[in-house]
Image (cartoon, rainbow, N blue to C red):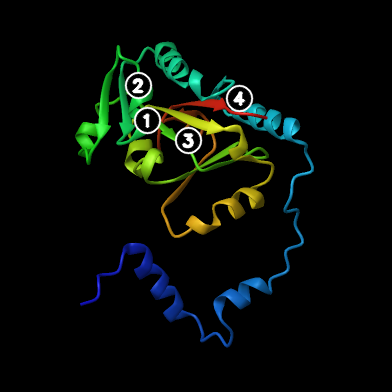
């Protein structure tokens, strides 16, 4: 017996059914598209990382720069202290070891929505980041957590390794292409929107605060 379609599979199946029959495979059709836009950044490594930091700061993201991963536990504690928070949510796995001893830690072993909502902050890693747009990509699962983990808490603390930062969007998308069938979320600063009077409101679609812990070699 075949498994039921996911919502994504059902939507794609409806789109395919509505389109005329393709005379060539989809992959071949996509490969024939002319891509004249810039696909590689011209920045050197230092310039790329500095642009990424500048974009994050411009989006009201707090950036804590570190030398290596041994400094991560202290940085997590600093991020929580600066925000006045003591309830931290972490995905089940290695990230639990980074949680400070003086905070309440919620480990996600399938926590319910009300249980997730008790946490003030969530700690995750990421898959890739884009310097030109200040965007961070999460491929959900493992240390990047379920999607609900990164939407419900008010504060997202995201660990980004410097070698995960790409100059342009096409470069970052190419890096995560092999995982494109999984659920992916892109983050460009804290969640915010503006009402009809152009008053900016944070936290409508996700965390009101974003802290990036940037570590690793240049």
- Residue at figure coordinates x 39%, y 38% from the top left: 143
Instruction: List the residue tagged with mark 4.
Output: 57
Q: Quickly name the residue at label 2.
A: 99
Q: Which type of secondary structure does the marked residue at label 3 adopt? A: loop
Q: Is residue 20 above or below residue 141?
A: below
Chain-order first, disc 4 or disc 2: 4
Disc sitting over residue 95 in the figure = 1
- Separation of marks 3 and 4 at Cα, in angstroms: 23 Å
In this view of the protein, can residue 191 be seen by the observer? yes
Look at the numbered disc 4 and give the secondary structure of its residue.
helix
Quarter assignment of residue 61: top right
Query: Which is more foreground, mark 4 or mark 2?
Result: 2
Question: Mark 3 or mark 4: which comes first in sequence?
Answer: 4
Q: Residue at x 77, y 38 (%)?
A: 43
Residue placed under numbered mark 3 in the picture: 195
Tell me: 177 left or right of 208: right
Q: Do the residues bearing badges 2 and 1 touch, measured as CB atoms within 8 Å?
A: yes
Determine the secondary structure under disc 2.
loop
Q: Is residue 151 visible?
A: no
Mark 1, mark 3: which one is toward the viewer?
A: 1
């Amino acid at each position: 017996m075949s498994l039921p379609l996911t919502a994504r599979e059902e939507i794609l199946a409806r789109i395919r059914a509505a389109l005329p029959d393709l005379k060539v495979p989809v992959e071949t059709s996509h490969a024939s598209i002319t891509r004249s836009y810039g696909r590689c950044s011209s920045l050197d490594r230092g310039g790329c990382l500095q642009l990424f930091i500048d974009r994050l700061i411009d989006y009201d993201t707090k950036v804590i720069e570190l030398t290596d991963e041994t400094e991560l536990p202290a940085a997590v504690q600093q991020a929580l202290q600066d925000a006045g928070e003591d309830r931290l949510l972490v995905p089940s796995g290695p990230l639990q070891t980074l949680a400070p001893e003086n905070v309440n830690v919620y480990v996600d072993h399938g926590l319910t929505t009300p249980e997730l909502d008790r946490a003030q902050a969530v700690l995750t890693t990421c898959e890739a980041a884009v310097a030109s747009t200040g965007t961070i990509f999460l491929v959900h699962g493992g240390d990047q957590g379920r999607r609900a983990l990164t939407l419900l808490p008010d504060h997202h603390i995201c660990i980004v390794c410097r070698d995960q930062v790409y100059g342009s969007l096409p470069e970052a998308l190419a890096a995560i292409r092999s995982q494109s069938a999984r659920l992916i979320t892109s983050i460009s600063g804290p969640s915010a929107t503006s009402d009809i009077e152009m008053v900016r409101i944070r936290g409508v679609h996700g965390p009101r605060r974003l802290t990036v812990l940037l570590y690793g070699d240049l």
